[in-house]
Amino acid sequence: MLDPAPSATIALAGGGTGGHVYPAIAMGDALRARGYRLLYFGETRRLEGRVAPAQGIEFHAVPAVAYPRSGVKSKAGFVAGLARATASARSLLVRHQVDAVLGVGGYIMAPTVMAAASLGIPAAIHEANVTPGLANRVCARVADLVLLTYAATADQIPGSAPREVVGCPVNPRVLSGDRAAALARYGLAPDRPTLLIVGGSLGAATINQIGLACVHAPRDWQIVFVTGPTYHDEIVASLGTLPPGVALLDYEDRMQDAYAAADLVLCRAGSSTLAELTAVGKPSVLVPSPNVTDNHQEANARGLESVGAALVVVEKDLDVPAVVGRVGALLGDQARRQQMGQAAFSQARLDTAQRVADLVEEHLLRDR
């Protein structure tokens, strides 16, 4: 570990969804614990604009430029917008005397990583999924270090930068939950199996569809249902009077409580979610989002399924009553849940954030 000077400054860049933001915070916390000054460059109106300041990280807005999938005129506008965003990021990097950049994915990352390359500031990028996103494929060409969650991603990343398989970092706070206290907070019984339903930081319509069916199903189990803020009012209106044995939340910023309460998790299959499931050793029913690049969530999910840690439900084949039946069967089978949980924990990589901090020091800060 290096002995950082007080002026050493590292900028995190990227975000948009919890799958990018929460790993960024975990990596940032590990770096901050070593004495580095931390900044976050992202979009004010998206998740990072709320989460980073709440974690005490100095936040700076960079103009967002999403890549258009079609249209010559739109793509020409994108190039102009990216140039403006990169110039804005250059100004921020110079003004705050940034020593290194750690890109965490999402299109908002690209201007900062490209600006860093133009200034000779070393940069690393982290790819959370099996199939790399567009921003990481572009930025890998100018990055000094590529950090991967899965070894299978290495051949899909362009450029000549060193590649290191580190896993997807998990915030240590998710490990700190207390089951009894969590169930009391949710108003649920301590002696009944509990299903956690969560569709990610924004929510997911399909997860909520299954969740509503679970709420209405005959059951001897209880539910923590995190709808996501986008869908919460709709779910509340649909349910009317909340049935007993159901805790309904729009957003949960204490996921350690949600995981501690859960005996089974119904969720999407983003890489950061799977990293958390393995870290806390929870069995899961995974419904990968089909609305992602190259169907990468299903590839993520199949890895957990292959070791017996999860059941995978493909959305295009969705049979809601059948899924509810499988959920109920698992909640009634403690031995199988225990086996699945042990299989999940066998895949955990709890040292990822510290490993990333080591590599950032070794590759980006060694010449300081």
Image: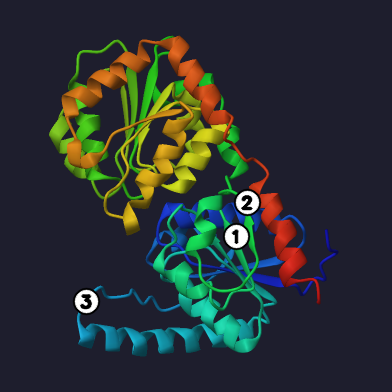
**Residue type of the residue flagged with mark 1:** Leu
- The scheme the figure's colours follow is rainbow
Residue linked to disc 3: 70
Q: CA distance from mark 2 to mark 3?
A: 35 Å
**Residue type of the residue flagged with mark 3:** Ser
Q: Residue furthest right?
A: 3
Quarter of the image where one finds residue 95 = bottom right
Q: Position of residue 250 (x, y in %)?
A: 32, 41
- The answer to whether the residue labelled 2 contacts the one labelled 1, judged by CB atoms less than 8 Å apart, is yes
Q: Position of residue 254 (x, y in %)?
A: 49, 39
- The answer to whether the residue labelled 2 contacts the one labelled 3, judged by CB atoms less than 8 Å apart, is no
Q: Position of residue 217 (x, y in %)?
A: 19, 18
Horizontal side of 96 relative to 271 (left or right) equals: right
Q: Count the marks.
A: 3
Q: Nearer the viewer, residue 251 or 340?
A: 340
- Comes first in the chain, label 1 or label 3: 3
Question: In this orientation, does residue 88 appear?
Answer: yes
Helix, strand or loop at mark 3? loop
Q: CA distance from mark 1 to mark 3?
A: 30 Å
Q: Nearer the viewer, residue 194 or 169?
A: 169
**Residue type of the residue flagged with mark 2:** Val
Image quadrant occupied by the C terminus? bottom right
Residue linked to disc 1: 147
Helix, strand or loop at mark 1? strand
Q: Position of residue 195 (x, y in %)?
A: 36, 24
- Comes first in the chain, label 2 or label 3: 3
Helix, strand or loop at mark 2? loop
